[in-house]
Image (tube, rainbow, N blue to C red):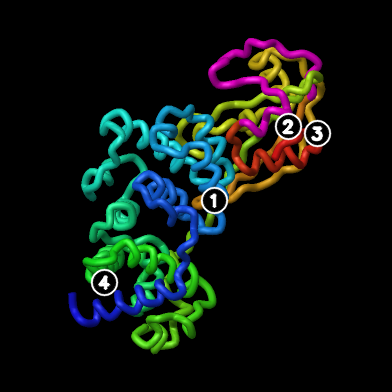
Amino acid sequence: MTNTNLDFASKLLSWFDQSGRKDLPWQQNKTPYRVWVSEIMLQQTQVNSVIEYYQRFMARFPTLESLAIADEDRVLELWAGLGYYARARNLHRTAKIVQHDLLGRFPDTLDSIIELPGIGRSTAGAILSIAFKQQATILDGNVKRVLCRFKAITSWPGERKTENELWILAERLTPSAHTDDYTQAIMDLGATLCTRSKPDCEHCPMVKDCQSFKLGIQSELPKSKPKKAIPLRHTRIVLIETDDEHILLEKRPPTGIWGGLYSLPEINTEQSLNDISQHCSTQFNCSLNSPVEAKTFQHTFSHFKLELQPVEFKSSNRQIMINDNDRFLWIKKDQLNQLGMPTPIAKYLKRCGHIDIN
């Protein structure tokens, strides 16, 4: 490691020792399991949003074994609202693999860790460095931002050539000693000082050597991904409420948006209200009153916007058995908060006024 690289690590570690955050829940008792769960939750999600979820998750699943034997619905229930639900399903799958195939021992090499579902090179590096205290490199969003500004890299970091360049730089800067603190320090620097907007350069330990600061372009970096028009998709959802205070729900397929969560049934947007009524009466074995179209609402995903048009029914009777009973179920309104539900659906149900859900 060159003197320049040593100086970078030394300044960063000194700053972290004096000013870095050390009281986050996942920084206590840093076992491979606890570090891994935190790193998965922190993917594309800010620290402040993760803390409460992490604490609840650890209270329910304090060990890898407890997560491995859990029902997927309970895992998704605790994840609801955190988004990117494939992370929760992969977390559950990985727990089962480690518990059953690896005899409960979390792997401790880069190649073996990245073979597990939902774990890439950067997440594996964080686990190795923080939990196993190995010299391993990370390159998450915070680190990319720090390095792009430090070296004034003006190309979009998502480009393969630029990302490879950043990996090489990150590996050169990662010290052989105190790698666990270094990993947390560089992530913390990006999260607290070298932020996306209004970076606090005055208090940054790297300001004297930061090339983008010298050029006055630190607020312009890293470069954003070239923008594309976000497509708008449309769907209809059905809310059927019975006189005995049950709601019809559909369990989403395991893959795709809201995978594995319970939601309101979706229907063909081309159908007339009369066709929808007839279809629902047959499909769900219930008598329905005239449908009412409620106000549409939108939810934005990373790659598209979804406009949802609710169609609301009242039903005076319902049959216990439903066609495709593995996919649909009736549930009492006061039990809705026991299921993992997509946030926009939960918010819509709450707005309806007659549904009590947290």
> Marks 4 and 1: in contact by CB < 8 Å?
no
Three-letter residue code for mark 1: Pro
Tell me if mark 4 has few (under 14), some (14-19) or many (20+) residues whose alpha carbon lies within 10 angstroms of its own: many
Tell me if mark 2 has few (under 14), some (14-19) or many (20+) residues whose alpha carbon lies within 10 angstroms of its own: many
The boundaries of the magenta stretch are 314-338
x and y, in percent, of residue 239 in the image:
71, 29
The residue where tag 2 is placed is 311
Tell me if mark 1 has few (under 14), some (14-19) or many (20+) residues whose alpha carbon lies within 10 angstroms of its own: few
The tag earlier along the polypeptide, 2 or 1, is 1
Q: Residue at 76% across / 14% down in the picture?
A: 287
The residue where tag 1 is placed is 231
Three-letter residue code for mark 2: Val
Mark 3 against mark 4, which lies toward the viewer?
4
The tag earlier along the polypeptide, 1 or 3, is 1
Three-letter residue code for mark 4: Leu
The tag earlier along the polypeptide, 2 or 4, is 4
